[in-house]
Amino acid sequence: MTGRRILNARVFFSLLFVTSFLFALWNRYSIAGDKVQVEHPARGVGSYPSQDETLLTAYSNASQLVRRDSDYHCTRDTPCPTYACCGSFGDGDVGICGFGPTFCGSDCASQCDAKSECGQYANPPGKKCPLNVCCSQYGFCGSTELFCEDECQSNCVLDPPVPGGGSGVPVVQNRVIGYYEAWAARRTCRAFPPSGIPVDGLTHVNFAFAYVDPGSLQITTVDSETPEDLFAKTTDIKNLKSSSSNLQVFVSIGGWTFSDNETATQSIFPTIVADQGKQQQFADNLVSFMTEYGFDGVDIDWEYPGAPDRGGETQDTKGFVELVQTLRNTFEASPRGNYGLSFTIPTSYWYLRWFDVPGMLKYADWANLMAYDLHGIWDRNDPIGSIIQGHTNLTEIKVAVDLLWRDNVPPGQVVLGMGFYGRSFQWRDTSCSSPGCPFSGPADAGPCTNNAGTLAYFEIQDILSDQEPKVVYDSEAAVNYIVFGDNHDQWVSYDDAKTLQQKVDWANSVGLGGVMIWSVDQDDNSFSALEGLIGESFPSFNA
């Protein structure tokens, strides 16, 4: 890959760890050799109407991240940007940012009660990092050598082993989950009804999304434009499966916009998990809903518990485990007794740290890892500039799952997310047209999905057919990209059969429990992406 490469796996995800300071402060610095942290608010599954494309993001390359003491100066009038203590002035007017008596003692000028993220100067002293990541000698959480070696204070494991060692057995195709976007049925072109889903290529279909009424906690449609009979039309696809298929249809509740700020639904999950009575009320309503429409299980897509920028509360972590336990107990007590139960998780440390994944997996069947939307138009506020990168990248995914291994999550209960779509950008300067070059905004919306900055797989295939752009394959990242458009000023990254198979091979090598697709309705009419994923062909869809 040409251009300024910033997707070194360990460097990239080391950025996702220095997170104890205010989320609104995007540049977070440690002292003497730790890393700058800028957080990437990972997107929820897929792209759907009215998503806020103004989210801030988070990453940078190694040369801009390695800092020295001289980079962390402060004055008596200018406090530390990290909310650290400003002290150790000596005989001069310039101090140094840090923690503990050297920086927070009698010579401290500002923020003198600051505590480190972890370690001896944290609150409480000796505090360890979430997800068992390393606590550096300077009190910051991370996973690179600079955090895990050089007098690391706790959890000093640089390369966590895969729990169980990884099976290496090709089993992920035994669980193939396809999300179905409810709004796909009303696209202005290439509308895709539930009956178009290639049922014999999937083990599970997740209907996305259902919402929850804030007052009654009854399960509802996302909006007034989504007809209630779409629930039944989706579960009816089980009648289309072959006799050898064991297809199950889940309802996915939540999604990114469900927890958006300033929405009536943002407080619903926090309210439910904070009250055992409401947990039971929600569980009872859910069983009634699944019984009425014939769903086989539920996928809880809360984006994200605990996260202060998403309306989360600290107690959400414990409450979410309790909710999953309540759901499992209620399902087992129901006449059917065996409803499926899954939940979605992010790759981002900032959000994942609020999940007790091992605790939840005591009661849930598996967790769906959203291993896409790693980059997008929300990167416009990156501190090193608006830099284009692929929205999925195997090197980043590998480091993301290291967080799960550190937390001792069984790999067989992790399902790897795949995107049947691409994230697209408008170049700022067409003379620089490879990853790492700057963008000015989203690429044009696709003619059918009508969402600037994203293109469905079928829309990308149309571009390949009509414009014949050069396809660049990044073997390390396992992703493709093309430059396209009348002015050759637009760019999109996407997966095809080759890159999907790379990800499948890796998932099998570490013993993951399946793959999931966002979203099956974005495949082309011959379902070539699904064929590339599982190695089987299917009858074409006639739009």
Image (spheres, rainbow, N blue to C red):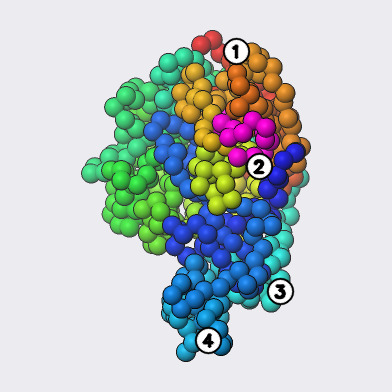
Lower position in the chain sequence, tag 1 or tag 3: 3
Pointer 4: what residue? Answer: 101
Decide which of tag 4 and tag 3 comes sooner along the chain. Answer: 4
Which residue is at 58% across, 35% downward?
428
Name the residue beneath numbered marker 2: 436
Q: Above or below — where is 373 with respect to 149?
A: above
Q: Is residue 138 left or right of residue 450?
A: right
Please give the residue where the numbered disc 1 appears in the rendered image: 540
Q: Amino acid at mark 4?
A: Pro
Q: For the residue marked with disc 3, what is the amino acid? A: Asp
Q: Determine whether 35 is above or below 331 in the image.
A: below
Q: Which residues are magenta?
A: 421-438
In front: 3, or 297?
Answer: 3
Whether residue 249 is visible: no
Q: Nearer the viewer, residue 272 or 313?
A: 313
Label 4 vs label 1, nearer the camera: 4
Q: Which residue is mark 3?
A: 150
Badge 2 amino acid: Gly
Q: Residue furthest top?
A: 542
Alpha carbon separation for disc pair 3 and 2: 31 Å
What is the C-alpha distance between the residues marked 2 and 1? Answer: 38 Å
